[in-house]
Amino acid sequence: MKVRSDKASRRSAQLARRAPVSPVAALPAATAFSRRPWRKACAVNGVAAAVAGILYGASGAAYAQAAQATDQAPATAPGGGDSLQEVVVTANAAQGVKKLDASYNIVAVDAEQIREANPKSTADILKVSPGIWPEASGGQTGANIEVAGFPSGGDSPFFTNMIEGLPMYGMPSLSFMDSSSLFRLDDTIERVEVVQGGPGAVFGPAQMGATANFILRRGTDTPTGDIGVTWGNEGLVRVDGFYGFKIADGWYGSAGGFYRSSDGVRNPQFQADQGGQFTATLSHDLDGGSLMFWSRVLDDKNQFIVPVPVIESASGDFSAYPGFSPLTGSYGSRSIQNVTLPNPAGGFETADLANGRGGTLYYFGSKYDQKIGDSWSLLNNFMVDGGQLNTNALFSGPNPRPLSYYLYGC
């Protein structure tokens, strides 16, 4: 940035020339734009001079880069020279905003970039956005999503996922119902837009940390489609597919989804991950707008892994518990797959551990986007959802158990 016309900046530059080198930052050598060379210095100066030196050093570096840019080809941003001109619709009402014009952090990735990122779960794709750390090592569900600057201990209390601009309301607290567990990534996703700060809390679901909006693929005039098969260790077999097509003039449809099965990272002797997802869209082009109806069904079950036993010595060293491998062992087995336990509230409760933490969910939504005249836009989103997101698991606890476990029904 150029600051040569700013008197305060010129004064900061003069202070920086007189100031000795600060231990915080070493001032750069003179550039072609410096009026006189830097003087040698060895003493420690005050904070004000150090800040002024950093400011001047930053502006001097900017001038040098500007001079070099005139002799070289213009640099392009990652993902192509038009990436900053990309219009993002997340958390911007009906207008949208260019990434170049936004004053807050926006990261948008398309389907090809999603495949290159190779996310292990819906939450894992959020790693493309600086400042967001998804703890996605636990599998397809139950990730802890941390947003820089917001203290959180579990799940995703400051983060929400959306589909086509519609928030998916899970329980953001530690309740095993974060919004990333409500759907899965597959080839029906066209792009993902992640917004941190800005108007996300106003036009989004009011989560002040960050918002991720998943945009669905639609049909086009030219029929398009793909199919893929993934197999690997842990008994993984997965089939993905998508097909978009033209129904009539101005009417388009699409369908796609996935199905997979896996033994899991710790084989429980039953299918750890099994199920799939199906998504369909029907869209219509209008004069200055569009109308789309979409539906999605998820029926997927995923292994729930609890802490494993290890032995800690008095010196702080860890070793394996006799008869249990901490690297591959699991509490799950066919012998305890179907359990019956006493309920603290009375009676007994049964569970099938093979169901894990999967979900049986359905969604139906619509999106009407219309431009009215030269300065008005109308956007209406609607969604109905329902189903279950149960947790079938045995939780490990302390041994021996404290009396409070029995007094308060834990």
Image: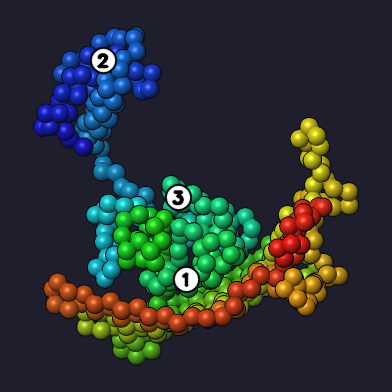
Mark whose residue sits in front, 2 or 3:
3
Labelled disc at residue 150: 3
Helix, strand or loop under label 3: loop
As measured in the structure, the alpha-carbon distance from the residue carrying label 1 to the one carrying label 2 is: 55 Å
As measured in the structure, the alpha-carbon distance from the residue carrying label 2 to the one carrying label 3 is: 38 Å
Residue type, label 3: Phe
Q: Is residue 307 left or right of residue 373?
A: right
Question: Which residue does the numbered mark 2 point to in the structure image?
Answer: 19
As measured in the structure, the alpha-carbon distance from the residue carrying label 1 to the one carrying label 3 is: 19 Å
Q: Earlier in the sequence, mark 1 or mark 2?
A: 2
Q: Residue at x 79, y 72 (%)?
A: 342
Helix, strand or loop under label 2: loop
Q: Which one is in front, 79 or 104?
A: 104
Labelled disc at residue 356: none
Question: Do the CB atoms of the residues marked 1 and 2 lie less than 8 Å apart?
Answer: no
* Among the 4 quarters of the image, the one containing residue 339: bottom right
Count neighbours of disc 2 (C-alpha within 10 A) and say few if under 14, some if 14 to 19, many if 20 or more: many
Query: Residue 32 placed where, x, y %?
Result: 20, 23
Query: Residue 325 placed where, x, y %?
Result: 82, 51
